[in-house]
Image (tube, rainbow, N blue to C red):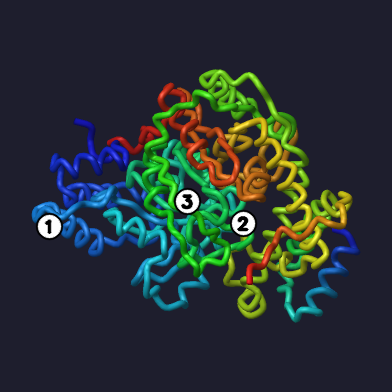
């Protein structure tokens, strides 16, 4: 029998449903692993032990009395610490937020997972206010990559990706504004899903740049992402960005495979800004899917620039009162960028937003001919903790912002995108980004599942976390 | 570090009443310069007048 921590969320849920194992045993095992291993990886900023044990006991009691169990009953999960968790202060990776009172309610998506029976075990480390791609947090320490603890986990949802890669929990939630789910998923070698902008409620999450903020799951299989996505859907009028859509459960569709899907590789910018390592991973995926065609996404460099500037302006405006009164309480990694962001001319933001409309129109036309686009998820695999510069195809570039080079042009217009991790012997993991038209999360996860089925994409528990 | 960016930071910060700590000044100017360089990519891109903002408001 596979050990509990190596099992996926859906596998654990199935074992609990058949009473092969109790929810309490699964929860206690997860808490014991967090106690034993988290000091090595620094994923968790809070462990909700009492809540988790009470929830697990309640699920076992429901089973004993014959009450129906939710689809994720007994599955341990944890959330980036920008999600409200009743009784915890929502840190959003900051020191400043420690002054806030504890949240009185769970965030909407935490409530959804809880209602599906999942067991919240804690909150996870991140870049301060989600403004970063490395999770080298000055206040709470860096989260370490479970595949090599000298390397970054990626960010800003670094704790969320690393906790899954280390087998501490099978399911986590993160946020993605410019790549903050897809970058850490790629670097930690786990599956991640950034749904369409406006699909899932963001209520109870501490936002960063609302024009681009998305929430989504990390897991060790495409089926787990689909299972979590399915239970997290639902209209929420309180979220101004949410677009009312019917519930569209996609788990059943994964078995359809890729037959009939028109898949293409993005060329130009998405190849030019990828290392040989990233291109090799993409080539493996393309070969497995028999992809023969390529597509040119128009003006991605301008799209990335526009996303960068809007993010600066929106993020800084959100924090302006604290920037004025207590700037030195910000993380040095975000402080100067936030201060500069407060000074962005309005004409830059307006032009960037108009360019966004133009770009959206051009890119959506591509989906008349193509269903799914593949790119590398990150230009390179995980860099070393503390590393400021990196080499990209013979050029020295600043490591932190360049990690988002391939994800920013996609979230800029809210397209759904998943990361499938390509794990090759002797190398650090790196992911492939799978992109589709708005609301076609089913297609991105069908492709991710196909890569998984072909043995190309997989998310094993990192070797260092196996003992 | 350009004089123009430094002057812009000083003037814009006064306009919005944002004190820039002296130890942050060089980093802020550097980030303003990066913003200015990146912004040229879309500021110099001609857009037809009927292209509206991607930031929409729903009443």
Examine the image and state in which quarter residue A13 appears: top left
Secondary structure at badge 2 equals loop
Query: Residue at image x 66%, y 67%?
Result: B57
| Residue under numbered circle 3 | A216
| Residue under numbered circle 2 | A212
Asked if the residues shown at circle 2 and circle 3 are in contact, with their CB atoms under 8 angstroms apart, the answer is no
> Of the residues under marks 2 and 1, which one precedes in the sequence?
1
Let me know if marks 2 and 3 both belong to one chain. Answer: yes
Cα distance in 3D space between marks 1 and 3:
30 Å
Where does residue A260 sit, x and y in percent of width and height?
53, 24
Where does residue A154 sit, x and y in percent of width and height?
53, 46
Query: Is residue A403 visible to the viewer in this orientation of the structure?
Result: yes
Tell me the number on the disc at residue A299: none
In-front residue for pair A280/A69: A69
In-front residue for pair A381/A53: A53
Let me know if marks 2 and 1 both belong to one chain. Answer: yes
Where does residue B6 sit, x and y in percent of width and height?
85, 66
Asked if the residues shown at circle 1 and circle 3 are in contact, with their CB atoms under 8 angstroms apart, the answer is no
For the residue carrying disc 2, how many other residues have a C-alpha within 10 Å: few (<14), some (14-19), or many (20+)? many
Secondary structure at badge 1 equals helix
Query: Is residue A221 visible to the viewer in this orientation of the structure?
Result: no
Indicate the quadrant containing the N terminus of chain A: top left, top right, bottom left or bottom right. top left
Tell me the number on the disc at residue A61: 1
Query: Residue at image x 66%, y 50%?
Result: A412
Please state if A461 lies on the left or on the right of A200 as rendered: left
Q: Chain of mark 2?
A: A
Q: Residue furthest left?
A: A64
Cα distance in 3D space between marks 2 and 1:
41 Å
């Amino acid at each position: 029998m596979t050990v509990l921590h190596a099992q996926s969320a859906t596998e654990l849920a199935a074992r609990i449903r058949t009473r092969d194992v109790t929810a309490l045993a699964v929860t206690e095992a997860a808490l014991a692993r967090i106690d034993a291993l988290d000091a090595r990886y620094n994923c968790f900023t809070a462990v909700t032990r009492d809540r988790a044990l009470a929830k697990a006991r309640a699920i076992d009691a429901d089973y004993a009395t014959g009450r129906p169990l939710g689809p994720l009953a007994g599955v341990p999960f944890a959330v980036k610490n920008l999600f409200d968790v009743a009784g915890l202060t929502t840190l959003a990776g900051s020191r400043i937020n420690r002054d806030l009172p504890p949240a009185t309610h769970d965030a909407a998506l935490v409530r959804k997972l809880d209602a599906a029976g999942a067991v919240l075990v804690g909150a996870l480390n991140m870049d301060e206010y989600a403004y970063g791609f490395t999770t080298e947090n000055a206040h709470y320490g860096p989260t370490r990559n479970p595949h090599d603890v000298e390397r970054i986990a990626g960010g800003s949802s670094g704790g969320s990706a690393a906790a899954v890669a280390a087998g501490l929990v099978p399911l986590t939630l993160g946020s993605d504004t410019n790549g903050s789910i897809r970058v850490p998923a790629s670097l930690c070698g786990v599956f991640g899903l950034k749904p369409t902008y406006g699909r899932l409620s963001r209520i109870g999450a501490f936002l960063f740049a609302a024009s681009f903020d998305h929430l989504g799951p990390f897991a060790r299989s495409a089926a787990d992402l689909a299972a979590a996505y399915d239970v997290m859907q639902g209209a929420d009028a309180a979220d101004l960005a949410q677009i009312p859509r019917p519930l569209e459960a996609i788990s059943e569709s994964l078995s359809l495979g890729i037959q009939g899907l028109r898949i293409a590789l993005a060329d130009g910018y998405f190849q030019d800004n990828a290392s040989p390592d990233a291109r090799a991973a993409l080539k493996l995926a393309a070969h497995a899917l028999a992809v023969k065609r390529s597509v040119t996404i128009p003006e991605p460099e301008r799209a990335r620039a526009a996303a960068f500037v809007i993010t600066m302006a929106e993020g800084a405006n959100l924090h302006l009162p604290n920037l004025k009164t207590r700037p030195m309480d910000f993380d040095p990694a975000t402080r100067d960028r936030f201060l500069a962001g407060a000074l962005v001319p309005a004409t830059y933001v307006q032009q960037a937003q108009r360019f966004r409309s133009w770009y959206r129109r051009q890119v959506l036309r591509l989906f008349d001919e193509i269903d799914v686009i593949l790119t590398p998820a990150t230009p390179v695999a995980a860099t070393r903790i503390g590393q400021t510069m990196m080499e990209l195809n013979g050029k020295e570039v600043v490591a932190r912002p360049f990690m988002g080079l391939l994800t920013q042009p996609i979230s800029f217009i809210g397209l759904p995108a998943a990361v499938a991790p390509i794990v090759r012997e002797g190398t650090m993991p790196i992911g492939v980004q799978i992109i589709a038209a708005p609301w076609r999360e089913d297609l991105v996860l069908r492709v991710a599942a196909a890569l998984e089925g072909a043995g190309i994409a997989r998310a094993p528990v990192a070797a260092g976390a196996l003992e | 570090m350009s004089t123009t960016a430094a002057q812009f930071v000083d003037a814009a910060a006064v306009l919005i009443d944002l004190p820039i700590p002296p130890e942050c000044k060089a980093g802020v100017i550097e980030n303003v310069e990066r913003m200015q360089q990146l912004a040229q990519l879309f500021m110099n891109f001609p857009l037809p007048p009927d292209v509206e903002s991607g930031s929409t408001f729903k009443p």
